[in-house]
Amino acid sequence: VVATYFHRTIRCQTCLQIESLARYDVTDVMVSDIESGQLSWRTLNFEDEGNTHFEKEFGLDGPSLVITLEDGDTVLKWARLDRVWEIYSDVDAFDKYVLGAVEEYLEEASEFAVKKSKSQ
């Protein structure tokens, strides 16, 4: 599972705050999942050459937090967490929303891994 914060080259204070809150949730709260390799965090400028394909792939029209379930280089499922823009000033609601989505994807990743190991 990968949590990616996509941003533009020019960044506003709200964008930076959303990134900071999301990074904390993923890298500090979910630290055991980061350490086990089940979860990773990345920040990408979707305006940089080589990253522009993400705009179409994830329907980006601005800075966005996207959670993906990946198998190697293949994205199996993804969710763009648009509500972060509505709730960034309510840290408890923000944490619940982001952590809930990440935990849901981690559960799906575990189920996928079990199915994949049984089919081999």
Image (cartoon, rainbow, N blue to C red):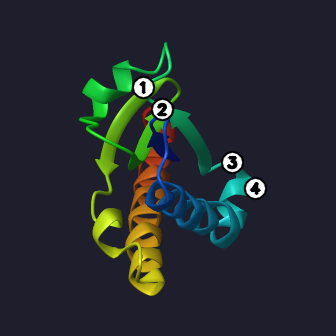
Q: Nearer the viewer, residue 83 or 38?
A: 83
- Note whether 8 is above or below 3 in the view shown: above
Labels 4 and 3 touching (C-beta < 8 A): yes
CA distance separating discs 3 and 1: 17 Å
Mark 4 residue crowding within 10 angstroms, few (<14) / some (14–19) / many (20+): few
- Determine which of the numbered discs, if any, sits on residue 35 in the image: 4
Q: Position of residue 117 (x, y in %)?
A: 51, 39
Q: Amino acid at mark 2?
A: Asp
Q: Earlier in the sequence, mark 3 or mark 1?
A: 3
Q: Amino acid at mark 3?
A: Gly
Q: Secondary structure at mark 2?
A: strand
How far apart, in angstroms, are the residues tagged by discs 2 and 3? Answer: 13 Å
Looking at the image, residue 28 sits to the left or right of residue 7; the answer is: right
Query: Dot 3: within a 10 Å radius of its alpha carbon, few (fewer than 14), some, or many (20 or more) residues?
Result: few
Query: Contact (CB < 8 A) between labels 2 and 3?
Result: no
Checking the image for residue 71, the label placed there is 2
Give the residue at mark 3. 37
Q: Residue furthest right?
A: 35
Q: Amino acid at mark 4?
A: Glu
The kind of secondary structure element at disc 3 is: loop
Sooner in the amino-acid sequence: mark 2 or mark 4: 4
Q: Which residue is mark 1?
A: 74
